[in-house]
Image: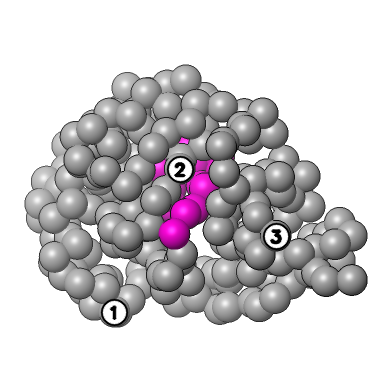
Amino acid sequence: MTVDIAALRPELEAGLAQLSQEPALAGPLLDYLALLARWNATYNLTAIRDPREMLAKHLLDSLAMQPFVRGLATLADLGTGPGLPGIPLAIATPGLQVTLVESNGKKARFLREAVRQLKLGNVQVAESRIEAFQPGATFDAITARALATLPLILDLGGHLLGDDGRLLAMKGVVPDDEIAALPPGWGVAAIHPLRVPGLAAERHLLEIVRTRA
C-alpha cells in the first residue's frame, strides 16, 4: 500500500491539539510512522496495514497516556512490539528515559533502526523476554499496551519496579475480573478514562501500585 505519509500531517496535528500536545511533534511522529509502514510491508510488525489507521490506533492512542508519564525519570515498555507506546511517549517526553523490552528478533531490529534514524537519545532497546530482563536499576514505571492480563504483567515484569514504582496499563473497558485477580501486595491506585482522537472505543489507563501492609 502506497500512502503519502506527509498528507496525514493535518489529521495528526488535529489529534495532537485535542490531546494538548505540541504541533511540532507531528514531524518526528510522521517519520516514525513512515518507517513503521515501510518495515511493516516486509516484516509484519503490526496487523494494522493502513498508515491512516495507524495514526489513530497507534500514535494517538499511545500519546493519550502521555500526561501520566510526565515527571517520571524512567519507563520500561514491556512487549513493546514495534515500539508502542514507548516510541511516541519518548518523542513527546524527551526528559523520560524509555527502555523498550521486546523478545522478537525482527521487532527488536526494527526498534534499533527506529532509535538510530529518529535519533532518540532517550531510548534504549532490550532484546529480552520480560521475565529474564535484569537491568542494573529498577524503573519508576512499567507499561504494557496489549500484552496480557494485569496479573500476568505483574508476574512477568513486577520485578522491574522499585518500591514506589507503578504499572501504567492501557486497557479498553475496565477489566474488573483482572483487578479482582491482582496478586497480593498490589492494588489499583487510579483508573483514568482516556479519550483518543479518531477512536470511538473505550480506553482506560490503570495505575497499579504496591499496597502497604
* Image-quadrant location for residue 212: bottom right
Whole-percent x and y of residue 124? 39, 37
Q: Vertical placement of 132 versus 193: above or below?
A: above
Please state which amino acid type lies under the numbered disc 2: Thr
Within the image, what quadrant is residue 141 found in?
Answer: bottom right
Name the residue at 80% across, 69% down: 211
The residue wearing badge 1 is 20
Question: Label 2, label 1: how many angstroms apart (C-alpha)?
Answer: 25 Å
Q: Quadrant of the N terminus?
A: top left
Left or right of 92: which side holds 144? Answer: right
Q: Which residue is depicted at the point 50% across and 26% down?
A: 127
Task: Give the residue at mark 2.
Answer: 99
Is residue 33 at all visible to an observer of this figure? yes
Q: Residues within 10 Å of mark 1 (few under 14, many from 20)?
A: few
From the viewer's perspective, tell me whether residue 41 is left or right of residue 199.
left
**The disc label shown at residue 163, or none:** 3
Label drawn at residue 49: none
Q: Position of residue 117 (x, y in %)?
A: 19, 34
Vertical comparison of 100 with 213: above or below: above
Name the amino acid, label 3. Answer: Asp
> Which of the two residues, 61 or 150, is positioned nearer the viewer here?
150
Q: CA distance from mark 3 to mark 1?
A: 31 Å
Query: Residues at badges 2 and 1 in contact (C-beta under 8 Å)?
Result: no
Q: Is residue 42 located in the magenta-colored stretch of the structure?
A: no
What is the three-letter code of the residue carrying label 1?
Answer: Ser
Q: Earlier in the sequence, mark 3 or mark 2?
A: 2
Magenta run includes residue 83 = yes
SS of the residue under disc 1 = loop
Residue numbers of the magenta segment: 73-86
In the rendered image, residue 120, in percent from the top left (x then y), is placed at 25, 44
